[in-house]
Image (spheres, helix red, strand yellow):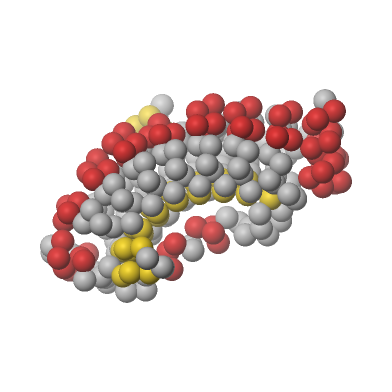
Amino acid sequence: MGGAVCMEEGKEDKRSVRREDSLMSADRIRRFTVKQFGYNILSLARRGLKKIPDELWEMVELEKLNLSLNSLKVLQPQLALLSNLVVLNLWGNQVLSLANNQLSYLPDSLANLTRLRKLNLSHNHIAHIPGCVYNMKALVFLHLACNHLENLAENIQSLVELKILIVEGNSLYSLPKAICYLTRLELLNLDFNNIKDVPQEMHQLSRLEKLACHPLDKGLHIVHNPLLKPIKEVLEGGITALFNYLKAG
């Protein structure tokens, strides 16, 4: 599943600090940053963190931050101070708050992360895409697999730069017409949801060049859904057959 993609950023820095109590100051944390491919990278993965150390807010030079596989339940609004971030990995935490009696939250201040290009929120408890995400107009990669999403808001169309959108393993039962305006999409993973039909306008996603099976393959991942006739049968002819059917409709 798309989990293979979300681990990519988790491997960037093998010099992660081992114990939470070793994070004493911003200078101490800086010792564990690395410069890789021109980016300032810090990994605090697998540290059992329950909150992000306050000292981190001084490190405005950070461009890639890996906080995956911790025990984060709240993200402090100060995270928005790291305005140079282009990659933020929050895979495998429990980012929580109360919204519609479901637990899901990102602080509104994160809307200020206008340079962010990759956001990984997979394996959390998110029931609705947080509003701040729709303001991250530079996003090209958004990973929301294995959450509790039941729908995608029409606001998704604001993320016009998206090339990779992964929402597999949720509870989506339909797709909004708005997703069809994300014409830069090269990988759209909708597998393992409850989708029964697709919008007629989906043929506009011309960069989805095939029906994909392997999690890392570009294309449209959708066959692992309870699709109804005739879509299920049409898909046997591949992506071209699907798009031709939708155009004819």
Q: Position of residue 232 (x, y in %)?
A: 81, 39
Q: Where is residue 135 in the image (x, y as percent from the top left)?
A: 40, 34
Q: Please name whichever residue, 158 or 194, is drawn nearer the observer in this view of the structure.
A: 158
Q: Position of residue 120 (x, y in %)?
A: 44, 51
In this view, the residue farthest toward the front is: 38
Residue 66 lies, with reference to residue 104, above or below; the image says: below
Q: Where is residue 114 in the image (x, y as percent from the top left)?
A: 36, 41
Residue at 63% across / 27% down in the picture? 177
Residue at 71% across / 29% down in the picture? 201
Residue at 26% across / 49% down in the picture? 82
Work out which quarter of the rendered image holds the C terminus and state it: top right
Residue at 16% across / 68% down in the picture? 28
Residue 37 lies, with reference to residue 110, above or below; the image says: below
Work out which quarter of the rendered image holds the N terminus and state it: bottom right
Q: Please name whichever residue, 92 or 13, is drawn nearer the observer in this view of the structure.
A: 13
Hey, which quadrant is residue 136 in on the image? top left
In this picture, residue 56 sits left or right of residue 125? left
